[in-house]
Amino acid sequence: MKKSAWGLVDAFFDEHNLVDHHVKSYNDFVNHRIQDIIDITEPIELEQGEYSVETGQLEIKKPFTKEADGSKSLIFPTEARLRNLTYSAHMYLEMRLLKKDESEPDFEKVYIGELPLMLKSDICHLNGLNKEELVVKGEDPQDPGGYFIVNGSERAIVTMEEIAPNKIILERIGEVEDRRARAIVTSIKSGFRARISLEYRKPRKTGVFLRISFPYVPGEIPLVVLLRALGLSTDEEIITHISDDFNYQMIIADDIQVSDQGLKLEPSEMEELSQEERRQYLQTSAIKYIGNRVAKGMTEEYRIRRAEDVIDRYLLPHMGVESETRAEKATYLAEMTEMLLQVISETREPHDKDHYTNKRLRVSGDLMEDLFRVAFTSLTRDMSYQLERSLARGKEPSVKQAVRSDVLTENIKHAIATGNWVGGRAGVSQLLDRTSYMGTLSHMRRVVSPLSRSQPHFEARDLHPTQFGKICPNETPEGPNCGLVKNLALMAKISEGSDPAEIENIIKKMGILE
């Protein structure tokens, strides 16, 4: 048994590396995700659309350094460590400046900045070298790679644990007899995180049971108002969309009655309207209600426009940010409401937030993607400012002169060098532990929870049964970090995310989904 067990371990490590999760995700980031970020970034437009900047393909060159005399030479990790340099690759992006009513010029390659390189990744000089070649280059053949060298220091990005995005998480608040519960969705669309929270609680005197909160809308608003704004205008549509259960329908009916008082509807006016006009009247009243929250004191036209913009862009953005997706969002919220009411009536169990099905691990590629997206946005803003300055001075605008490469370089370098990431998180990158070889391997497989260290969080610190085979049951620090800083099990492998469209196509081919 022992022989066969170790044979299995050897076979596993013949194919996989201990830091594969970092290297593979970084390779995916470099080979695909950077180009995707550039492609979906909004184009730069100047002087009311007179000029615009178009971007093309990105090219990343293997690491080299410029010496004081202007000569260029390839740089290897050992040299970067000894000379306190950053081991990074130079990025060149195809760009062209288009002028209205003029022929399109050719793309020109513009240097946009440096990208810190992960050792042993696809664009690293060490990738594919055998043991003898690594020794010649001054490297330890047993070194796993998977970290960065910034200003001569070795920095490792630790894996971050988070609640699964775009998934409804149901939780009780207080005891069962309190009859309070919450449904939360962390909706993520190209780096923007929107937390949507739907809460059921007994109203004080005359209030509504179901209230919802989402970004850019101060406080909470009644769910019924939001559903009306999304197009479920009539009472019947709202009730039947949410549930067929009579008890749940009665709760919704009560909410509709109280919410309509807040909308200040005029029953006498509605009686004279046709069915379609009544739907329109109800929807407009709900949008005005939200508009009064998001743009109080502005003109009515602006309030309506702002409310529609907030609903489209910040409510469940993962479902789409176009106005055509409103009906789908209304259906999603109706499903979410029924699930919440089932928790209240104890016909459905709330979710266990510590269950590993409800968790996701964010590795180097995901975290670098967030960083690059923000850094590239800063670069495009700076470019548009530089181009506008040239135009204001009457100069001929040039893309090459408008790009200040240190904007991108410094943004990314600073985050990796300090560990202060976008979104206000600290300690995302850490100085690599070189106390011993085992210490280094352990550090590369660390998993960190975002929960506060100063609070008890007993359940989160406990060893959960679903961690079996994924998280090491023994290796965790003593003290305040106990149970919040974990390590991957020796043979745990993190699966890569897949393209949802690809999965949808496979399901359609199988005939499960129409």
Image (tube, helix red, strand yellow):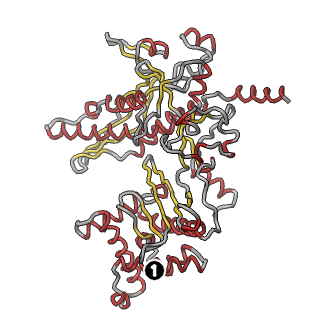
404 or 452, nearer to the observer: 452
Up-down: is 11 above or below 249?
above
Quarter-of-image position of residue 283: bottom left
Residue 256, image x and y in percent? 45, 78
197 relative position to 267: left or right: right
Label 1 sits on what residue type?
Thr
Can residue 109 be seen in the rendering of this structure? no
Q: Quadrant of the C terminus?
A: bottom right
270 relative position to 211: left or right: left
Residue 16, image x and y in percent? 67, 29
365 relative position to 311: left or right: right
- Residue at the location (32% across, 32% down)? 407
- Residue at the location (62% across, 22% down)? 438
108 or 494, nearer to the observer: 494
Residue 479, image x and y in percent? 55, 34
Within 10 angstroms of label 1, few (less than 14), some, or many (20 or more) residues?
Answer: some
- Residue at the location (48% across, 65% down)? 199
Residue 198, image x and y in percent? 48, 63
137 or 424, nearer to the observer: 424
User: In the structure shown, which secondary structural element does the residue marked by tag 1 occupy?
Assistant: loop
Quarter-of-image position of residue 378: top left
Which residue position holds label 1?
A: 234
- Residue at the location (60% across, 17% down)? 129
127 relative position to 322: left or right: right
